[in-house]
Image (cartoon, grey):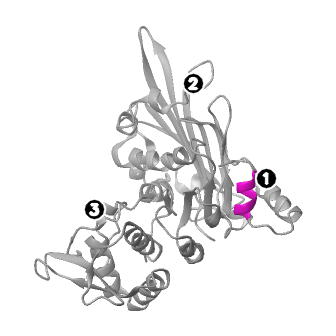
Amino acid sequence: MERRLIELEVENFRSLRRVKVPLGPLNVLVGPNGAGKTNLLEVFRFLSDVILSDLEPALDVRGGFDEVAFRGGKRAPRRISVGLQATWTRYSSLNAPDVYRLDVNRRTLGDGFTLSRSESFQFKRTQGRGRRITITGEEAAVVGLDRRDEVSGERVFGIRRMSSGLSTLPRLSTKEGGTEVAAVAERLASFRVFDVDVTRARLPSRFPRGRGEVLDHDAANLAAFLLALRGRDRDTWDRLVEDACTVLPQLSGIDFDYPSGSAREVVLILRERGLRGPTQLGDASYGTIRLLGLLALLYDPEPPALTCVEEIDHGLHPQALELLVERLREASERTQFLIATHSPALADRLRPEELIVCERTGDGSSIIPAVSTDKLREIVARSEGLPLGDLWFSGALGGDL
């Protein structure tokens, strides 16, 4: 059974007034600026922050409830909700998925307000009955324990008022569902919103800590990650270099230098045709550095459960997009992708089930998806096979540029 996120449901998170988004292995968001693509990606960064720092700090770093909540319409919302369905735990399936929901509620109190949260987890604990964990106020309840687990009915215990179950419940015992909650929390915490910081990626990296060097979310350790990858899997390294040389015709190879000694820093070196000497990555073009960062991402041997990338085509030549989509599909066998783009040329290379059209209404709320997959297939069939990018650019799919 493939372990992946199968649906995201969001209410009142920035422009996401009420959206329910089915997710496959590769998901590409298209639509005009302000349609909600970035906000959808931000939901996953928020959930990761909830696990790493807890709920209130995750809200505070975004300016608090009022800054995160939907600001359209006549009335301010009193609740922000995020719900997930996935097949992450041992006995889950498409027919019996893991279900997680978080509600953050705002209640007026005198001249101010107070926040509360409620959460629920639902999953298959054994081949038989499932488990449900609910959190309200300062109480958490484990429901569905049976006599085979030597506990029957429901167990209730205390929890801090605004602590998230994602950060605290993995400490439950195995029979109470701690293993399953830990699996959900681990997946969410691993989510990566990837954006190559070209300025930082140009710089020397500290020498890799081992063969399992983890690629930074901004590719700041690009040289160290690629050096570790070469040492770990030479075949994968050779394929990455071959792809880089295919997209960058002047490139003949990639190597490394150690300006501060072989145990301290590493620099990426590009060997280019027609030049007397190698080029340090610091002197390479913006597009070259972004491409290498994306290839590092796509060849990551231990990727997170979900990788989000905004404006994946930014700085890339259109000729790179064919190879990029091929590698995305290959990598989506190891990690799910949620990607935003404004490129019709990239959309041309997608299948209907990979495209998510985003629109925004007059009240500021996002519609995602604006067109179902079945409707996309129908439009493509009626167009006699026109590529999706052409159809989107023409306005036939909505989400106009």
Q: Nearer the viewer, residue 253 or 65?
A: 253
Give the residue displayed 67% in from the left and 70% down from the top: 349
Which residue is label 1 attached to? Answer: 396
Callout 3 environment at 10 Å: few (<14), some (14 to 19), or many (20+)? Answer: some
Q: In the rendered structure, which segment of residues is drawn in magenta?
A: 388-395
Q: Nearer the viewer, residue 223 or 150?
A: 223
Distance, label 3 to label 2, CA atoms, is 39 Å
Give the residue displayed 54% in from the left and 33% down from the top: 80
**Residue mark closest to the camera, 2 vs 1:** 1
93 lies left or right of 275:
right
Q: In terms of sequence position, does the residue under pointer 3 or pointer 2 come before the other?
A: 2
Distance, label 1 to label 3, CA atoms, is 40 Å
Where does residue 138 sit, x and y in percent of width and height? Answer: 43, 30
The reply to whether the magenta stretch includes residue 97 is: no
- Marks 3 and 2 in Cβ contact (< 8 Å): no
The reply to whether the magenta stretch includes residue 392 is: yes
**Up-down: is 124 above or below 206?**
above
Q: Nearer the viewer, residue 311 or 187?
A: 311
Q: Is residue 89 visible?
A: no
**Residue mark closest to the camera, 3 vs 2:** 3
Residue 77's disc is 2
Which residue is label 3 attached to? Answer: 200
